Each structure stands twice: as structure tokens, then as C-alpha cells.
Amino acid sequence: MDMLKRYNFFIDVLIFTCGLYSVASLEDNELKLITIGTDVTDGLRRYLRSTNKYDLDAEVFGIGMDWKGGDVANSAGGGHKVNILKKELEKYKDQENLILMFTDSYDVVLTAGKQDILEKFKKFNARVVFSAEGFCWPDPSLAASYPEVKSKEKRFLNSGGYVGYAKDLYEIITHRSIKDTDDDQLYFTNIFLDETLRKKWNMKLDVKSELFQNMHGAQGDVTIKFKSDHSYAYNVITGTTPVVVHGNGPIKPEFNRFANYLADGWTTQNGCQACKEETISIRELKDDEFPTVLVSLFFEQPTPFAEDFLERIANLKYPKSRIDLFIHNKVEFHNKDIASFLEKYNDMYRSATILMPSDGIYEAAARNWAVEVCKQKNDQYLFSVDVYAQITDPETLIDLIEQNRTVLAPILSRPYKLWSNFWGAVNKDGWYARSEDYIDIVEKKKIGLWNVPYITGAYLIHGSLMEELRDIYSAESLLE
């Protein structure tokens, strides 16, 4: 089975009491969102889509920098974020009325605008508010040092989201030195647990998820609700509607599914709004203006209706002069089908690379070879299709390209069956699990653009990813 593992791109399927200080009225306050993203990933684009949706002033620091904060997805680290902020926030340190909200970017979606954020912040009567979670990370030994909270509240600081006055945040961020590879959450935890410093800056935790919802360990606490054409997160435990939804920790597939609906990406009233955004149009182009595509076809096991499959590929409404053909056939049985297809259509294509059983090329090597050919020919897209995937709509390739995504698959299904070419969720071992919206998507009760953890059979990949995908396929990744 052909599996793509996502790193910097998404896999989509087509069918986010008083303290030392008194807090003045927030009516005259300005709000600026700040985040860090050293690479322009689909996660960052999703974050920016949500800030644009709610007309929020967002500034991204670190674009183009080499990340020096370690592998924060799997271990402690992230001190580089603090050091970037030390430099970038200096320009705001004297702006008394400026409120800054920091969040992570790759796994964060905003669900409301400036007024909601400021109103919720005001209720804390604090100078700085940090998000909270149910895990004391990265040093569990500090758990007992935290102030007590009620049974349904979150006790421990999470540094993936915080909001406060610019002056106070700058003082906190510059209070101590930190190495790039040190842990940013531990840095802020130690400051918060120092009662003198906590009172000095009137710091509080968002224990009820009024502003910030950290999802790790809390997936059962949160659901999606719809009001008219608006979607939002609702915490069923605390009764709150958090503005920032953060997919922290090892729950990225679950968060990605949840985020499909946030920022009005899909609503019960209007369906898929994200499908209409950032698209392109190529239908009216002249033939020689169409993007070049490597169409790679894989015959890995004897499959019925191979002749029909090839004819449907030939019938795609796309100029063959803009298609480079790549065929890998591992099955002698299909030699005749492929020979007939090439005899009829080969000269119409821009080029053809053919690997037959006699070449002795295994599947993983062939799929990696297709990536290399796409890169060498400077094709703008790679469209990979397995022989069992009957593309019945001739406009499929154009439809996929016009969606303008990095990795996109059409939904393939079997009549009257729940089989499809995608997984809505994965279990803790990385294998199939059924998401709560899987059946609705397969049965086309929900039509949209869905971020999913797994696709197979047919998919389009943007050419800009070819270097990143080099040698991505292995024998292990293709096992059932």
C-alpha cells in the first residue's frame, strides 16, 4: 500500500481578582498577533488563513532562518523562539496600550476576531495570561509547585499561547538568558512558579480554556459547533468557546481533522468555504500554457479492467503535449495492455519513461524514480495513479490543479461500500482508525476539502515538493 507521510505539507482530499496592576479599559488598546515560523508550510498558511479571516493583525518572525530549537515535536526544546522574540519585540516594549498575543503557528487556528480576544482577556484582570494544559511538561517534578485548580480545570502552563501587555511580555521574555536548544516552556514555567515574579507581572493561567484550547489530552473535552455560517470550538467541560485552538503534542492528525471545520472552513450552512479560497484557473489557457505534469502509472499486481484504466487516462481533458508519462509495470500479464496503449498514444505525450517487468525494478524504487523524473524534467506537478484507480471524470486532473494545494487526492470509492482511498484518522500505531466524519465524507453527505493523515491510489503533488520527497518511498511504507 502506498503511503505518503506528511512533514511540511498537508495531505488533502477533495469531494480551521485584582493583582499588583489594575487593568484599564481595553477599548483603546491595539492588538497584534505574533508568531514564529522559519518555513512557509501548509500549517503556517492555515494559521494565516484564520488570522486573515478575522481581520487580525498578525506578524510572523523567523521566515528563512535555520531552526536551532531542536526537534520540539518529539522532545524538549524551542528556546530559539524566545531568542527570536527577544530581538523582535524590542520595538514594542514602550507601547503602553499594545497587547500582544503569541501563539505557535504550524498547529494553531484562530476562531474569532479582535473584539472577542480583548473581551476575554479583560475578564482575567491580568497583565499576562498563559494557556494551560493537563500535562506538566517538560519537567513533571514541578507539578506540585503549581497553584491548585478545580477538578475540571487545567493546571499547567503551556507556552504555545499567551497574551499580555507588550511591556510586560518583553520584560518576561528578556528576564533570563536561554539557549536556543533549551526548552521554552520550562523557561516560562520557572518564571510563573516564582511567586514574586508571578505577582510582579500579574500572570495568570487560562485554566478554563476561555482564550486558549490546548488539544493534547483534551480531545474529548472539545467539539465543533455551528451557528449560521460560523464554526467554532466549544469546550463541553467548562462551557467556554476558546479563540485559539492549538494542536499541541502528538495529536497532529486529530487536530488536522478538527481544524478542517474551524475558521469557517466547512459549515453546515455553506459547506466548504476553504474550497473556494486561493484557487487558480487554467481552463482558458492555450495548450502550451498549461502546467507540465508527470503522470505516473503503476501496475503492481494483476488487476482487471487495466485496458479501461489506460483509456480513461488517455481521455483526461488535459493537453498530452504538457504531460510526461511514467509507467511502472511489474506484471507480465499487463504487457499487452500497455503496449497497445503506447502504440496508440505514445507520440502524443511530451515524453515517456517505461519500466517493464524485465527491468526488475521494485515498487518503492519505481515510485522514487518517478519523483526524480518529475524533478529532472522540471514538471510543475506529479499525478500518481495506481491501476485499480479508475478515474471516471475526465476533468479530474484540471480540477485538482485548480484547487492549488501542495498534496491533493480525489476521493475514490466503491459503489455501496465504505471503502475509499483515504483514512480519516490513524490509531496510536499509525494504522487505520475511523474518524467520526469518515462515513459522511465517503457517502458525500459532506463535500469539501479534508486534511487527512493517509491517501493512496491517486494523488497530485506540487512539483516544489520533489526535493523534499526524494527517496520517501521504502518497502516498509508500501506494505499493507
Image (tube, helix red, strand yellow):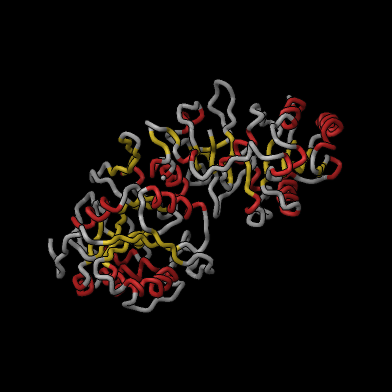
Is residue 333 visible in this depiction of the protein?
no
Residue that lies at the very extreme toward the bottom in this rendered image: 177
Residue that lies at the very extreme toward the left in this rendered image: 17
Quadrant of the drawing holding the N terminus: top right
Where residue 460 sits: x, y (%)?
Answer: 63, 42
Where residue 360 sits: x, y (%)?
Answer: 82, 45
Where residue 217 sits: x, y (%)?
Answer: 36, 50
Question: What residue is shown at x 27% (from left), y 41% (from top)?
Answer: 236
Quadrant of the drawing holding the C terminus: top right
Above or below, 180 against 8 in this view is below
Where residue 106 sits: x, y (%)?
Answer: 46, 55
Above or below, 208 against 89 in this view is above
Left of 402 or right of it: where is 246? left
Q: For residue 190, what is the image quadrant?
A: bottom left
Question: What residue is shown at x 79% (from left), y 38% (from top)?
Answer: 329
Residues 272 and 94: in front is 94
Left of 5 or right of it: where is 268? left
Q: How many marks?
A: 0
